[in-house]
Image (cartoon, coloured by chain):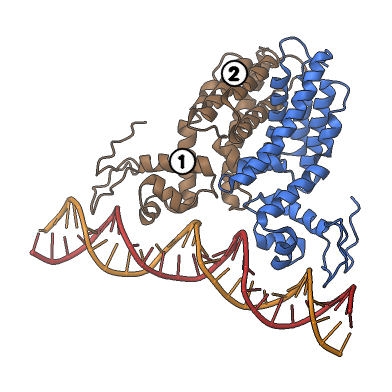
Chain colours: A blue, B brown, C red, D orange
DNA sequence: TGCTTTCCATACCGGGCGGTATATAGTGCA
DNA sequence: TGCACTATATACCGCCCGGTATGGAAAGCA
């Protein structure tokens, strides 16, 4: 992420077609603003994050926000994109581990690092969003669930391959194992959100690996 | 739960000192109203449940609600009490299973039944509250976390006994195992909240039991 | 039949929400 | 220098939130 300097003039990060920049140039960097917005959404959830808090954290005013990112829902989706790209990079990397257990280990450790990395522990943004937001538009719920479903599918696919390669013992279905691993990861997020200590979560990782079937 | 008839006059369920009933008697049953409120909180979370939706579900008006239950926070706490008493009865029952695996099985199956019992699957109310509510008063967060902590403590204590009784193999710490089991249960709640099918959750139960260490 | 007491129904309160209208400031271009 | 264009700043909109004031309705008691 090349994170442009916060000089007075800084755009073309969003519209990569590099418009000829007619009119007054914007005085903030959309990438940085979006990063700040992501932090707020992550801390507060979609509904808990007010536009006032968002604009303050982003360092811009409401009209600027609406002009650049559309409405709150659209801003949230863009933040989700950024989240997947930056914070969930470890998921894709984990899939190339040599064995199923290696995949699980990388997912668990990556999730642990993500949950305890920034200031205070917190769950994956997707977990927060899917549990927390019971009121808001179905469109966002669907969005979040679709993203998680695709993540599930990737893991299931990887574990099916692992089964063929002999990583998993008899009687263990790859789909069930993927679902189980996701549950542990989500449970870790819940515990992180409710103030678990880092060591506790690390212990959770070790226990899960200790119980892991196959190689 | 003896669930009083919804006759016109029905009280003394809350104030068990059986006041001599001076003045106009209330025209609703506090127990039934609280049950309805619990359903709303469970579906929407604390912040997602508006007073309008609550009063409508409870079949009473706002002044009646405030007179009988205090404010929203107090109503939520009373609903939590009811939830623990009714919905989480299986937790205490599970602790008297003969082995650690039996405890785990009863917790998993009880949690599955709870999550998929009513209309649509949903997470444990405690899980929802601890993840979802990032804004509201610390007092409620503390309340929810304290209740869950006590539940954790009970399980840990039970597993320490199990260790002494030889239910758990070497190298498995009872505290870590309790934490791990909680994570799976919470993960199940997350998946239930985001629309997992009943069979998926049942599969999760079976997988966890299949991987369970000891007896 | 008053009188007290309590509950119910309606209408209302200040405040914060997501979102926007308007006027001004800062650019490139002619 | 003026024009077209776009971003910013301020103030504002309607709406819904949790919570409440007020007047009337239903009971026991005298």
For label 1, the SS is: helix
Residue B95 percent across, percent down from the top left? 56, 21
| Chain under callout 1 | B
- Crowding near pointer 1: few (<14 within 10 Å), some, many (20+)? many
- Which residue in the protein does label 2 denote? B105
Q: Residue at x 44, y 53 (%)?
A: B52
> Residue sitting at 83 percent across and 44 percent down?
A86
Residue A148: quarter of image: top right
- Left or right, A25 with reference to B111: right
Query: Whole-Å distance between the Cαs marked 2 and 1?
Result: 27 Å
Q: Are marks 2 and 1 on the same chain?
A: yes
What chain letter is assigned to the residue under label 2?
B
Looking at the picture, how far across and down is residue B187, in whole percent? Answer: 65, 31
Numbered circle sitting on residue B38: 1
Residue A2 visible in the picture: yes
Q: Residue at x 83, y 17 (%)?
A: A215
């Amino acid at each position: 992420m090349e994170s442009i300097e916060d000089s007075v003039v800084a755009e073309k990060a969003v519209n990569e077609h590099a418009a000829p920049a007619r009119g007054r140039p914007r005085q903030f960097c959309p990438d940085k603003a979006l990063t700040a917005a992501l932090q707020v959404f992550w801390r507060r959830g979609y509904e808990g994050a007010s536009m006032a808090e968002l604009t303050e954290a982003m360092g811009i005013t409401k009209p600027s926000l609406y002009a650049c990112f559309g409405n709150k829902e659209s801003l949230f989706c863009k933040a989700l994109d950024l989240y997947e790209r930056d914070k969930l990079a470890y998921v894709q990397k984990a899939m190339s581990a040599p064995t199923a257990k290696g995949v699980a280990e990388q997912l668990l450790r990556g999730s642990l690092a993500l949950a305890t990395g920034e200031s205070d522990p917190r769950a994956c943004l997707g977990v927060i969003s899917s549990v927390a937001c019971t009121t808001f538009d179905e469109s966002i719920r669907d969005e979040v669930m679709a993203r998680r479903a695709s993540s599930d599918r990737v893991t299931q696919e990887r574990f099916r391959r692992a089964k063929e390669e002999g990583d998993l013992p008899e009687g263990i279905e790859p789909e069930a194992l993927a679902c189980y691993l996701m549950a542990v990861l989500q449970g870790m997020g819940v515990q992180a959100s409710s103030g678990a200590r880092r060591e506790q979560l690390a212990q959770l990782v070790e226990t899960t690996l200790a119980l892991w079937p196959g190689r």
